[in-house]
Amino acid sequence: MKITGKAIKYGDNVDTDVIIPARYLNTSDPKELASHCMEDIDKTFVSRVKKGDIMVGGFNFGCGSSREHAPIAIKESGISCVVAKSFARIFYRNAINTGLAIVEFDQEIEEGDELEIDFDGGILINKTKGTKGIFPPFPDFLKNIIEKGGLMPSLK
Amino acid sequence: MGMTMTQKILASHAGKDKVVVGELIMANLDLVLGNDVTSPVAIKEFEKAGCKGVFDCEKIALVMDHFTPNKDIKAAEQTKLVREFAGKRNIKHYYDVGEMGVEHALLPEKGLVVSGDLVIGADSHTCTYGALGAFSTGVGSTDMAAGMSYGKAWFKVPSAIRFNLTGKLSKWVSGKDVILHIIGMIGVDGALYKSMEFSGEGVSSLSIDDRFTICNMAIEAGAKNGIFPVDKVTLEYIKNHSKRAPVIFNADDDAEYEKTIDIDLSKVESTIAFPHLPSNTKTFSEFSEIKIDQVVIGSCTNGRYSDFEKAAKIIKGKKVAKGIRVLIIPATQKIFLQMAEKGLTKIFVDAGCAVSTPTCGPCLGGHMGILAKGERSLATTNRNFVGRMGHPESEVYLCSPEVAAASALTGYITHPSKI
Ligand code: SF4
């Protein structure tokens, strides 16, 4: 699988309370969740995100609560993949289990950079900067979950 | 090479003699937990996947605690969905208003977790039960759906950091200060993906409630779980609360740890986490007068009877400072009743505090004590992220029940020795 998209960049420790504030957790409707995605740290996100854009974070992306509403909101907003230096563990498994693509990548990416990600090869090309980096592809165990379309179908 | 306590519990539940760090395993579950926020998502997944039934109707706990008693129509719809599912699937441990409590205080109290168990919960603070020598960790709703249906979950076997505890806590200092001190030291990702294993001669002096508080916040250091060895204190607690027999796992002498961090409990001071990260900690010598608008004593971190006992001792016979709101939220019905019977409720109400029925409420900015723009709350809860208790421009400071009680009387963050 290969995707390309523009980077929307945030810093370290992006927590699930800013991805989707708890005050909106009285619903699990993806559209409604997406309409409040990131609003506490970035009021412009919802209006400027375009389908296929790539969210970029620093260390410990998705820390905080276990709410699956967070990857659901990000995915529904149109984001095709989250690239971060590291992920908080519950967010990591929620992303895999719900089919939001994620990549652990430790090189600098700037806001607006045009990125191309090759998941099978584990290659990330930064077209704007003209650089190329590698990341570890998923182990077979997790690839199987993703290929079967998530955790539930993989266990059947 | 030997195994850590966590690795041993994982191995036994995966039907293996041995597991190694990084290994991916499928493990059998002793309990699957969900709340009113995460269960609806899990139930939808469960139904969508066409699951025939639950793996064991006695090994699922559904606790309606976040937005209950229902704060609005949407919250009511969510609880209704869970209530109907629980009825249809014959879920034994479904707890609704009148019986419910904050999940991580409720489950141990009901005896649903014992040493050696493997528990997943669709709530990040599921790591609390490590205090009982169980492996427990937070997962998402899809994991919960799979857990309810198949009784299994996948795990990557974690490495561990050992915290070697020595000495005894000094006056006014409790479990909350220990864990805030540790998070301040290692950071919010200091234990990312890892186990935090507590050991050493200092363990025996910690009450079970201190251990619950410490394990509760392991997630705030990014950890997969926190875990204490099983000793007299643990066994006594389990005997008084559960009919099930504990299974004791000890770490091997040659277990491998990424590192060992020594914590001298006698040196730990009252510690406050400043906005907007639990790792942003300071002790009293590092700040001066900080005015507050609200104090919250409650949550799965510090909403147990002993927490209110400590607070009541400080507040007894006094009045809360003018202009601040003080919320007392016992974590379970049992604690609520005990507070009334032992006269704590009267102490709090006489002092001018509001005493509430159990709920997560303000801890996650849900309801019952939401902050306006620019307001500041001191709370015994566990997270102080941007907007956690209300307006994105409000602030949350985290502290022990002792500090919260002292500060309720003065209106600014105060060391209990000053009262
Ligand atoms: S009290 Fe707070 S941290 Fe604990 S379960 Fe409720 S919302 Fe989560």
Image (cartoon, coloured by chain):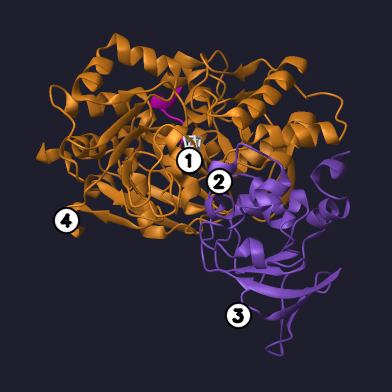
Chain colours: A purple, B orange
Residue for badge 1: B364
Q: Residue at x 74, y 86 (%)?
A: A127
Say which of marks 2 and 3 sits in front.
3
Q: Which residue is at the front of the view, B383 or B161?
A: B383
Q: Is residue B409 above or below residue B394?
A: above
Determine if the C-beta at disc 2 is less than 8 A from ligand 1.
Answer: yes
Going from the N terminus, do you reach mark 2 or mark 3 first? 2
Determine if the C-beta at disc 1 is less than 8 A from ligand 1.
Answer: yes
User: Residue B183: x percent and y percent?
Assistant: 39, 53
Residue for badge 2: A65
Do callouts 1 and 2 mark residues in contact (Cβ within 8 Å)?
yes
Residue for badge 4: B288
Q: Which residue is at the front of the view, B60 or A52?
A: A52
Q: Secondary structure at mark 4?
A: loop
> What's the amino acid at mark 3?
Glu
Q: State the extent of the magenta-drawn residues as a range.
A: B229-235
Do callouts 2 and 4 mark residues in contact (Cβ within 8 Å)?
no
Q: Which residue is at the front of the view, B238 or A48?
A: A48
Residue for badge 3: A110
Q: Is residue B332 above or below residue A113?
A: above
Going from the N terminus, do you reach mark 4 or mark 1 first? 4
Q: Are marks 4 and 1 on the same chain?
A: yes
